[in-house]
Image: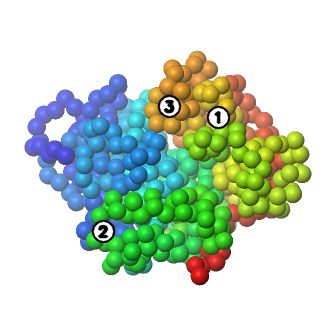
Amino acid sequence: MTITGPVESAEPVVRTGCGAVRGRDEDGLAVFRGIPFAQAPVGDARFAAPRRPRPWDGIRDAYAFGPPPPQDLGAVGAAAPPDAPAGDDWLTVNVWTPAPDPAARRPVMVWIHGGAYKMGHSGSPAYDARRIAADGDLVVVTLNYRLGMEGFAHIEGAPANRGLLDQVAALVWVQENITAFGGDPGQVTIFGESAGAGSVASLLAMPRAAGLFRRAVAQSVPGTFFSTGLAADIGSALAGELGLRPTVEDLAGIAPDRLVEAGQALAPKMPGNVPRWGQAAPTVTPYAPVVDGEFLPVAPWQALASGAARDVDLMTGHNRDENRLFTAMAGKLGAVGEDRASAALRLYAPGGEAAYRAAFPEASANELYERVQTDWLFAMPSLHLAEAHLAGGGRAHVYELTWPAPAFDGALGACHALDIPLLFGTFQESLALLQFGGAEPSEEALALSSRFRADWTAFARTGDPGWPAYDTRQRLVRVFDAEPAVAPYPEETSRRLWESHAFTPLPLVAPEA
């Protein structure tokens, strides 16, 4: 960070509530990186709710992304960008704007990244928002939030859902400052994928987030929300990896990287804990939003069905073959046998294993495994979020991505996270390297990418992405393929299987003996 006096500059300068920031002109956009929206959550602020940032004098250079929050940097796509500074100012935002003109009042899109609530950061090249801002003539904000134990573990003496509270603080910053960057605080759309979509769903249900955004896009919503009992038990196991109790007193003096290591140590042990942690165990992800009764009073589906966000326009959807990304990364693509398929069906299928086998009589073991995993973790939670919003008096648009990733001769299908390079146009970054094989995108891919941005930005501008709102009579959705179309929801067989299922907080099945 560099702070200078009020000198003349050809670069864009904007005055925020805490002080002036200087960005850069990049390809016709003004770009500002690494602006703090809260104090560094360290010292006496460790494990606390985010605190308002301290003001500064002079002009702060906003050239570089802020430091990534502590996480497993060995994960795909999680490596820090080369110009990211070290330090503990993890809670920062970045802004792309066509012009920092307070009179412009452009729509604003706020991106919340995914990463299983334990990895990722807004400085990832995969989330370069310049194409969205330029194509849509709007302002885009991306943000960091606390991850892993820092942001989501149950710690006695600390508020729950600290990572979500960070997101609320960032949205407050947007409300207070985005006008100076050319944005309209009354036209804010939040959008996120995977854990980012789970965060979007959470924000729709959080009283503290009410009024901070007008529209929401949830891409591949995970159905994993923890009950307080499950979160407390997993929190104890995480702290136990360090030989400590899950308390602020025990953990506040522990270096953040050691907490990351505790999560890394516990994750591979989780699949053996199905009798104790149930459906959460095989996910090898010990973090999720906690339905704590305070910051997140009830799970998003119950909140939306009761009308908690009826005035917020919602767009949600998923990819047809979500789970193939994970089987590919595990080296099991197309190779799951009967034993694993049967175990997954018994654990996840509503109505039990027989119901899925009867509904998909021609499916192989591998196909059944992929289908039930995709349905349970992403597809049905996303669809049910739209249906809950309708039940609560809201309006929703639904999509499904069916276009297959081109790598491996299409074997990945429309896998998890394929929507990210299509939306951002970042085909040579992060997971896109796996999905596109490092090759230049085809004309077909570029056209679909342009369609994604056009629909997303139209929704942010008007609440109408260009296809009919979802209803429970026709169930029309946008199907994104080589030729995007509007059609009845394609996964009708799965929809019927899950029709009566309620996505509620995952319980603690049995405490440790």
Instruction: Look at mark 2 in the image and give the residue it sits on.
Output: 254
Query: In the rendered image, is residue 325 in sight?
Result: no
Mark number, residue 446: none
Of the image marks 2 and 3, the number of the one nearer the N terminus:
2
Mark 2: secondary structure = loop
Q: Left or right: 381 with respect to 193?
A: right
Contact flag, marks 2 and 3 (Cβ < 8 Å): no
Per the model, the C-alpha gap separating discs 2 and 3 is: 35 Å
Whether residue 500 sits left or right of residue 297 in the image: it is right
Quarter occupied by the C terminus: bottom right
- Seen at 41% across and 52% down, the residue is 72
* Residue 216 picture location, percent across and down: 56, 49
Q: CA distance from mark 2 to mark 1?
A: 40 Å
Amino acid under label 3? Leu
Q: Position of residue 247 (x, y in %)?
A: 39, 78
Which residue in the structure is indicated by mark 3? 433
Residue at the location (41% across, 32% down)?
Answer: 130
Q: Which residue is mark 1?
A: 412
Q: Position of residue 113 (x, y in %)?
A: 47, 47
Mark 2 nearby-residue class (10 Å; few <14, some 14–19, many ≥20): few
**Foreground residue among 26 and 118:** 118
* Residue type at the position of mark 2: Ile
Q: Residue at x 66, y 71 (%)?
A: 275
Mark 1 or 3 closer to N-term? 1
Q: Residue at x 25, y 49 (%)?
A: 86
- In the image, residue 509 above or below residue 218: below
Q: Nearer the viewer, residue 39 or 68?
A: 68
The quadrant holding residue 5 is: top left
Q: Is residue 488 left or right of residue 336?
A: right
